[in-house]
Image (cartoon, rainbow, N blue to C red):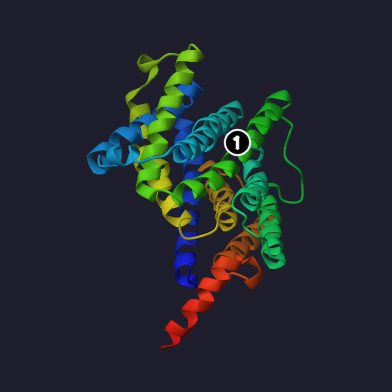
Amino acid sequence: MDRNTATAGALAICVAAALWGLDGVVLTPRLSNLAVPFVVFLLHVVPFGLMQPVLFRCWGRLRTFDRRTWLVLLLVSLSGGLVGTLCIVKALFIVEFKQLSVVVLLQKLQPVFAILLAAGLLKEQLSARFVAWAAAAVSGGYLLTFGLRGPDLSGGDQTLHAAVFAIIAAACFGAATVFGKLLLGKVDFKTATFARYGLTSVLAASYLLLAGVGLPLSTTTPGNWAIVVLISLTTGSGAIFLYYWGLTRVRATVATICELCLPLSAVVLDHLVNGARLGAWQWVGGLVLVGSILRISTMRTDPETIKPAERDRRAADEPRRRT
């Protein structure tokens, strides 16, 4: 994979992550009058319905899935779709969108889960240079969110509960990055998005029934529906399309670092929309984060990270390139 392709993929993931930051700060707060499981259901079933006129051919592709593909799809839908979304929306609702620094904690831990899983499941070897820049990116993200102080836990048990949900979400989203990479090894990004939203809608509906929440449509205001549709077209399925397109062009370990653009956009938007001020060290952290992401996204694959079969293939292709 050449540098331009990898850079384009990394940029797509950065844009998708920034859109998710917009969602958390500006859009999802407008749904706080609804039950959390119902919000998760709406944020999947509505985009899935909107996909039908454009991606209806994906129904036929689902019939070609083998058991392994269905299993990977189930893992993606459970981790990144149902459980991860439930936990992050619950965390945001608990703090009433006033202490975003605690919830954004998830983005500091997500790369840890994703990189470990990628090394274990995808056999993505990690060079010392990559680990160093990844550590710089995580450190920059921490400074961006917290400055030189720790997370603000002054909210008592309520904030601690939000932090727990945020950590669970971090593990789920980190796992979803790796499982998504496995899924994209078997299907194209359009089918992957279609299938993920479809299966997550089924899982979310099942959860609503089991939890006794039902479908409280009467509590959904016209404003809520407008926000759900807007999320569906932009920060929801739109961002997922962009994310999966990018994920086909970069390694899972690179993707999870690029996703640190989420806290970057969340903190900046929190400043612009809610008037939260950024300290000097937060600006330093933002610069370190952006610089590290740019370095990782343009980094050439080190020779030691190339598998033997891939190295042999490249060596065989080299004479043909020269001619």
Q: Position of residue 156 (x, y in %)?
A: 74, 26
Above-or-below relation of 271 to 164: below
Q: Residue 54 placed where, x, y %?
A: 24, 43
Q: Nearer the viewer, residue 232 or 52?
A: 52
Using residue 19 as the reference point, say whether residue 79 is left or right of it. right
Residue under the point 50% across and 24% down: 36
Q: Residue at x 47, y 34 (%)?
A: 28
- Toward the top, the furthest residue is 212
Spot the residue most to the right.
149
Spot occupied by residue 131 in the image (x, y as percentages of width and height):
70, 61
Determine the residue positioned at 64% across, 34% down: 168
Does any portion of residue 295 appear in the rendered image?
A: no
Q: Which residue is mark 1?
A: 169
Question: 163 or 196: which is nearer to us?
Answer: 196
- Image quarter (top left, top right, bottom left or bottom right) of the C terminus: bottom left
Q: Is residue 34 above or below residue 260?
A: above
Please give the count of numbered marks on the rendered protein. 1
Measured as percent of width and height from the top left, residue 209 is found at 45, 14
Left or right, 188 with respect to 146, comes to left
Residue 133 seen from this side: yes
